[in-house]
Image (spheres, helix red, strand yellow):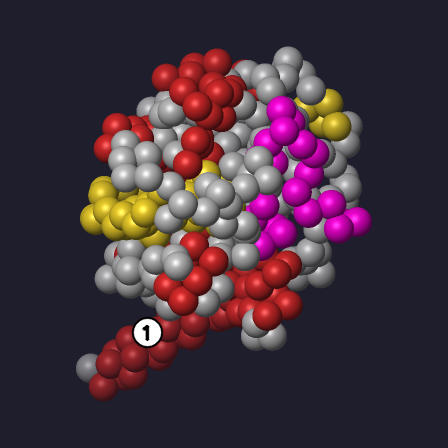
């Protein structure tokens, strides 16, 4: 009996050591290459082209402004990018998934509901209607839950990549302030009470959206994860917030979807650079420029067909209707423990 006990203990020890070696090997398999990571836009083309006198998004221009003011921002964003890439790599290796090693999923897979605080700076009382607010929340829920009615038009090449991000949005509160100025610019004055703006409401647990006249034909911009709490959130021009006929081809609420994508760490789908600059998503094609209006399929750049129907391109609202599976993982990786958006699920 004594010999049998020793034998069993020895076998258990060998199994435990084998499992540890397997896990160690899996850890070693996750090699994160950050050589391509950049926070700047190639050739200082910060806003892309202008379409219909509208600059679709100045998120990268605002980022450059913030990087100049906050010397620690670059490192924080680098650390977040490393964490996101590591989570996606671990998911690809099967670690932390049912049937794989570990027990905690590297990509957050639980329910996510994001309270939205709408901060309205209007030139006259009632300029931004309740219908705009209601429609904007509805559009966000449609787009982040793969319920856009146009998704059936996705080309077959990309049909298997359409993602249900499974993020829901609810209106938490609406703050209004009347201010007659013609434009607020893109340097976050609308977020600063000392400049006449409205301070964000607990940005660790709320998505703050500022609605105002940005000026310069700018539709909107967002702050990427890693920025200061005092400026965290999304800014949308008054005409382009929710469904609004005044917004024209950009009046169906998709500026909100695009900017919330940035707030959840998505880059423009063409990577804000030439063919060698990526958006850090494996299943979106490389491109070297934005697309506008409603392009025909295929539209070819960098020797591949552009995913022009992606929310992170610059096409008109009716012609964007998908996030990819890779974009889904990139966004949901933010909500894990110690992630920059974990406050929304804990």
Based on the picture, tell me whether residue 46 belongs to the magenta stretch: yes
**Dominant SS type (magenta):** loop
Residue 24 in the image: x percent, y percent? 50, 70
Q: Which residues are drawn in magenta?
A: 42-62
Depicted 293 relative to depicted 12: above or below: above
Quarter of the image with the C terminus in it: bottom left
Name the residue located 70 percent from the left edge and 34 percent from the top edge.
49
Q: Position of residue 27 (x, y in %)?
A: 51, 66
Residue at 71%, 60% (x, y): give it. 35
- Sort mark 1 into few (<14), some (14-19) or many (20+) by Cα contacts within 10 Å: few
Q: Nearer the viewer, residue 71 or 243?
A: 243
User: What residue is rendered at 79% in x and 49% in y?
Assistant: 43
Residue topped by disc 1 = 12
Closer-to-camera residue (306/50): 50
**How far across and down, in percent of the image, does residue 64 sit?**
64, 59
| Left or right: residue 24 compared with residue 204 | right
Q: Secondary structure at mark 1?
A: helix
Q: Tell me if residue 90 is in the magenta stretch.
A: no
Q: Is 94 rendered above or below residue 123?
A: below
Q: Quadrant of the N terminus?
A: bottom left
Q: Nearer the viewer, residue 61 or 10?
A: 61
- On screen, residue 56 versus residue 125, left or right, reads right
Report whether residue 168 is seen: no
Residue drawn 28% across the image and 32% down it: 129
Q: Position of residue 335 (x, y in %)?
A: 36, 56
Whether residue 250 sits left or right of residue 301 in the image: it is left
């Amino acid at each position: 009996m004594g010999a049998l006990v020793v034998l069993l203990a020895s076998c258990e020890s060998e199994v435990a050591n084998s499992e540890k070696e397997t896990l160690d090997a899996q850890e070693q398999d996750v090699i994160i290459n950050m050589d391509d990571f950049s926070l700047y836009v190639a050739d200082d083309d910060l806003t892309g082209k202008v379409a219909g006198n509208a600059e679709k998004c100045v998120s990268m221009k605002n980022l450059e402004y913030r990087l100049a003011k906050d010397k620690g921002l670059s490192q924080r964003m680098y650390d977040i990018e490393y964490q996101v890439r590591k989570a996606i790599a671990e998911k690809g290796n099967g670690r932390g998934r049912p049937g794989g090693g570990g027990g905690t999923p590297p990509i957050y897979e639980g329910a996510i509901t994001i309270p939205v605080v709408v901060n309205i700076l209007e030139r006259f009382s009632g300029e931004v209607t309740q219908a705009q607010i209601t429609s904007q929340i509805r559009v966000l829920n449609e787009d982040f839950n793969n319920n856009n009615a146009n998704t059936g038009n996705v080309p077959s090449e990309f049909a298997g990549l359409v993602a249900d991000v499974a993020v829901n949005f609810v209106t938490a509160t609406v703050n209004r302030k009347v201010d007659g100025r013609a434009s607020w610019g893109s340097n976050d004055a609308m977020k600063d009470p000392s400049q006449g703006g409205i301070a964000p409401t607990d940005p660790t647990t709320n998505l703050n959206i500022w609605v105002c006249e940005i000026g310069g034909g700018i539709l909107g911009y967002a702050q990427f994860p890693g920025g200061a709490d005092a400026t965290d959130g999304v800014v949308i021009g008054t005409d382009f917030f929710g469904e609004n006929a005044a917004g024209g081809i950009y009046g169906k609420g998709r500026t909100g979807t695009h900017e919330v994508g940035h707030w959840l760490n998505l880059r423009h789908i063409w990577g804000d650079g030439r063919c060698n600059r990526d958006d850090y998503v494996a299943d979106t094609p490389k491109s070297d420029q934005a697309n506008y209006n409603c392009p025909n399929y295929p539209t070819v750049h960098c020797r591949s067909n552009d995913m022009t129907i992606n929310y992170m391109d610059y096409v008109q609202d009716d012609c964007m209707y998908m996030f990819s599976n890779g974009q889904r993982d990139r966004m949901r990786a933010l909500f894990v423990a110690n992630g920059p958006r974990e406050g929304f699920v804990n």
